[in-house]
Amino acid sequence: MTFQRNTYRIFFIILWLVLFGALLKRDYFISSIDINEEQIIKRSREESFAGIYFQNERIGFVKNRLTESGSDAYLLYQDAFLYLNILNESHPIDMRIEATLGLDMRLKDFNFQFTSPFYKMEAEGRVVGQEVHFSLTTGKETISDTIALQQPPYLSTNNRFYLMEQGLQPGDKLKIPYFDPISLSGKDTVMEYKGRKKVLVNGRVYNLHHFIETFSGVRINSWLDDEGKVMKEESPAGFVFISEPEFKATDIKFKGQEILSSVSIPLIGGSLDLTDLNTIRYRLTLPPDTEFDLNKDRQSFANDILTVNKESLPEHDALSCKGFTEELASSPYIQSKNKRITEVAREATGKAGSDLERVRILSDWVYTNLEKRPVLGIPDALTTLNTKMGDCNEHAALFAALARNVGVPTRIVAGVTFFDGAFYYHAWNEVCLDGNWYSLDTTKNQLPADLSHIKFVEGETDKQIKIAALLGKLKIEIADDREN
């Protein structure tokens, strides 16, 4: 039981890592604003360091270095290292990027590496016009793909003096397109200047410039000095970057505070008994300025009340839905057309008489064949198939690849589910049969998923990051008028 609970809770760690990368990527990709090339080199020749804190304990550091490369390019190096205490075990995480920049600071090419226990990922790419052409290696296979951006991406060091040179007034905003090397996706972010604010940093009060960056509903706060140096930065996931000298930033705790204990959502209004229920009603308190489509499929939402209806599965001969191109597509992390995925999917479902039976078989196959343990990395179907291990993220990714391979439109969805007295952030799947979407959870071996599954988002990791806006702010209680 304890192991299952931890399998659900680990979903938060993936969001944590993507948010961590979101802080890092803003030291890479910036908007097409005026940049003085000489000032960049002048201010960035030396290495800079930032300590990474969680619950006031330094658990890692980031190191930045920018150097000249001949007469027409610069080289950017950034290393990030941290220890995550998960279930009272210390898990090292190592992220490294090396990039070539043009004289205008636009990205030419990059190599990104991510390493953690049981997971290793490497991506490399180059920019062609407004496209990033990249290859991804997570195991035995290398996958190539292209991401289209609104503008060619820019790179910068962690000294953001260029913001100080824009003459911004409180309330002014900048729209910034970027490419995230962790999730391998492009997004727009909006940075708003809030004016000056007195902030305590390392025991000293500074009068700093406050910026708020918003992307996918997530808000990141940054405080810069007059020279544009980032003195402090924090995200809703509970970690903070603080500019520090090398000797201090690298003095990290091998085993800090246990991270997963901070992510559960207590149930307000008593215990949750789902026995014999086909419908349940929750009262949700959502953070302001967040947007989630909760009124969809088996859920309906009005006046803060969410009604969840347990689906009745279709007839045995139900057919897969037609026309859902995206939900049948292969992606860098959901490799549904891979030869190995094809072999497993076809072998498992070879004697199935209907699409519903194929869903049942593949759901049971994933539940039975995966060792349920934390894997700290971006969920990857092919790697999961090779290692036969993972948490809810890997279960959902592998099932999606297998089901799509046999022609069943399949989503990855994320939200919360109830276990052992509280709600935990979680990922599961939905499939489309006979014109309707049906939920299933291969971590819990449920088809359909029980009524404690509350869906907030659909999509892979780059979409799931929206859930970070709920961390520490979402409240759930049982409404008084439940129906059988």
Image (cartoon, rainbow, N blue to C red):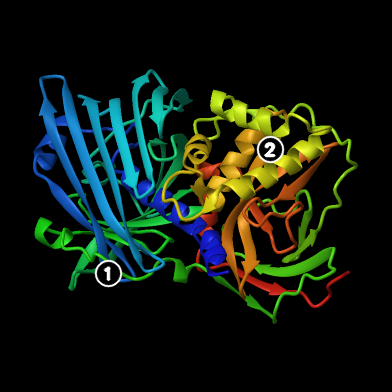
Task: Label 1, secondary structure: give it.
Answer: strand
387 or 130: nearer the eye? Answer: 387
425 or 245: nearer the eye? Answer: 425
Taking 357 as reference, is 325 above or below it?
A: above
Residue sitting farthest toward the bottom: 270
Residue 97: x percent and y percent? 26, 37
Q: Which residue is mark 1?
A: 57
Residue 11: image tag: none
Task: State the quadrant of the C terminus.
Answer: bottom right
The amino acid on which the numbered mark 1 sits, given as a three-letter code, is: Glu
84 or 247: nearer the eye? Answer: 84
Q: Are marks 2 and 1 in contact (CB under 8 Å)?
A: no
Residue neighbourhood size for the residue with mark 2, other residues' Cα within 10 Å, grouped as few (<14), some (14–19), many (≥20)? many
Residue 1: x percent and y percent? 58, 69
Left or right side of 120 for 378: right
Q: Is residue 216 visible?
A: no
Residue sitting farthest toward the top: 128
Residue neighbourhood size for the residue with mark 1, other residues' Cα within 10 Å, grouped as few (<14), some (14–19), many (≥20)? some
Q: Which residue is mark 2?
A: 410
The amino acid on which the numbered mark 2 sits, given as a three-letter code, is: Thr
At a point 71% along the width and 45% down the height, the residue shown is 430
At a point 79% along the width and 53% down the height, the residue shown is 298
Taking 82 as reference, is 143 above or below it?
A: above
> Residue 483 occupies which quadrant of the picture?
bottom right
